[in-house]
Amino acid sequence: METLVIDLDGVRDRGALMRAFARDLPAPEYFGANWDALADVLRDLSWRPADGYRIEIRGAGPLTVADPRTWEILREILDEARAFWSAHDVAFDVAIG
């Protein structure tokens, strides 16, 4: 299982969140830094082949307070990615700390 750690230290808005994902995945060059692109990248990890995935979100506290709507959308996208991979019998776990 591949573990991908996304460090949200200092992230307080959507733009900084997208930069954190682009940096820490690391997302492919075609990553468009918007919600649709993030959803696409998390459902197509062919650029990072593994038998399963674990996304660890660290330091989310400030974002949840500063921009709760962005946090809510991120959670929805992660849940959708989890459902997608589950339908394909691939482990996809998300840990938030």
Image (spheres, rainbow, N blue to C red):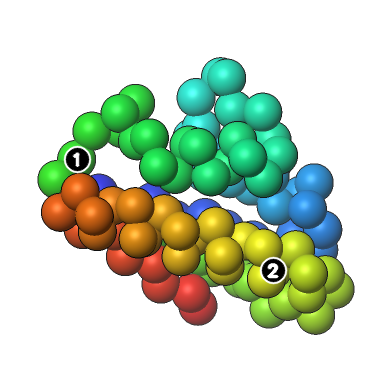
Q: Which mark is residue 20?
A: none
Q: Which residue is the site of mark 2?
A: 71
Counting labels gives 2
Q: Does label 2 or label 1 sit earlier along the sequence?
A: 1
Front one among 25 and 52: 52
Residue at x 46% of width, y 58% of height: 80
Secondary structure beneath label 1: loop
The local crowd at label 1, few if under 14, some if 14 to 19, many if 20 or more residues have their Cα within 10 Å, is: few
Q: Which residue is the site of mark 1?
A: 50
Residue at x 59% of width, y 28% of height: 31
The local crowd at label 2, few if under 14, some if 14 to 19, many if 20 or more residues have their Cα within 10 Å, is: many
User: From this viewpoint, which residue is outermost toward the front?
Assistant: 87
Q: Is residue 9 left or right of residue 92?
A: right
Front one among 31 and 22: 31
Residue at x 28% of width, y 52% of height: 85
Residue 43 visible to an observer of this rendering: yes
